Image (tube, helix red, strand yellow):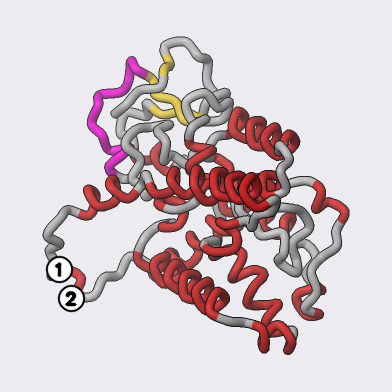
Amino acid sequence: MGKRRLIQILSAAACNGAVPNLFSGTVSASPLKRICVPGLNCHSCPAAVASCPAGSLQTFLAGGRFPFFTAGFLLLAGVLGGRAVCGFLCPFGFFQEILHKIAGKRKTRAARRMRPAVPLHRLSSAARPVKYAVLLLFVLALPLAMYIKNGYASPYFCAYICPAGTLGAGIPLVLADEALRAAAGFLFSWKVSLAVFFVLWSFFTFRPFCKYVCPLGALYGLFNRIAWFGIQVDAEKCTGCGRCTAGCKMNAAAVNGLECIRCGECLSLCPEQALFVRGFRPARSLRTKHT
C-alpha cells in the first residue's frame, strides 16, 4: 500500500469516526462540527465528526453572514496544499478512486471499437469549467442572492447536486427512518439518480466528479501555483517530452496546473527524473514549468 493511499484511508476514517451512528440512523452531534475538514465530506452523514467547507460556506451566506472562519480555513488549506487536499484528504475523491480501481483497466471489445466523433480529451477540456460555474452559482451566488431577496436561502449545492451528501447522509438516514422514507419525494429521487450516475461514471473515468463538478476542487486548484506542497520541474533536466502530463489520470495540462492533485504518479513517469516534490530538494535550478 502506497503512502498516499494510507493517508487517504486515515483521512476518511478521521472525518467519519462516529461509526456507531451509522447503525442508529442518527446524525453525529460532535462538537468538532463547529470546524471544517479540508475535503468534501457531508456534515449530515451519521458518522461525520466535522463540517464540510462547501456546506459551511453556503450556510453562512444563506444566513446573511460573512464566512470568516470558513474562508480563512479554505485560504490556509489552499496555500498549504492546493489540490493536494483532493489527492490526499478528500473522502469522496478517495471513494471515486476505489470505484475506478475496482473496474480496472479492462475494456470490452465494444469499447475498443468505439471511435468518438470528438476526441475525449477535447470533451474533457470543454467540461472542466463546469466546476467553476458550480462554485460561483450554487455555492456563492444563489445562497447570497436568495437571502437578499427573501431573508433566507438554501444551501443549493448540498440540496441539489452533492452526491457525497446523498451517499453519506441522505440514503443512510432515509433507510433508517420510516418517517423520512414517507416524506422522500422528487428531490430525493433526483439526488439519488445523480449519485448513482457519478458512481457508475467513476468505474469508467478517474474521479469524474473531481474533474468536472466539485467546487472545492475548483477553489483549491486556484492555489496550485503558489501552494507550499506541490510538484516542481528541474528545468535543467526536463526535455519537454510530455510524459508527465500524457500519463496524468486527472488529464492535467501542466505540472502544478489547475487539475493537478499532487498524487505524485508523474514522478515515476519522467524518464529524466526531472520532477520533485517541492520542499524535498534545494530550490536551485528548479522552477514550475508547463510541459
Q: Position of residue 72 (x, y in %)?
A: 70, 32
- Is 119 within the magenta? no
Dots 2, 1 in contact, CB < 8 A: yes
Height in image: 192 above or below 216?
below
Residue type, mark 1 in image: Met
Q: Position of residue 87 (x, y in %)?
A: 53, 46
Residue type, mark 2 in image: Ala
Which residue position holds label 1?
114
| Quadrant for the C terminus in the image | top left
**Residue lying farthest to the front in this orientation:** 149
Q: Residues within 10 Å of mark 2 (few under 14, many from 20)?
A: few
Q: Position of residue 157 (x, y in %)?
A: 56, 56
| Quadrant for the N terminus in the image | bottom right
The answer, for residue 171, to whether it is visible in the render is: yes
Height in image: 288 above or below 256?
above
Which residue position holds label 2?
110
Residue drawn where x is 56% and y is 30% of the image: 229
Residue span colored magenta: 235-246
Q: Position of residue 213 (x, y in %)?
A: 45, 53
Height in image: 134 above or below 219?
below
- Is 239 within the magenta? yes
Q: Hey, which quadrant is residue 132 in on the image?
A: top left
**Under tag 1, what secondary structure?**
loop
The answer, for residue 39, to whether it is visible in the render is: no
**Under tag 2, what secondary structure?**
helix
Image side of residue 48 versus residue 100, left or right: right
Residue drawn where x is 39% and y is 67% of the image: 201
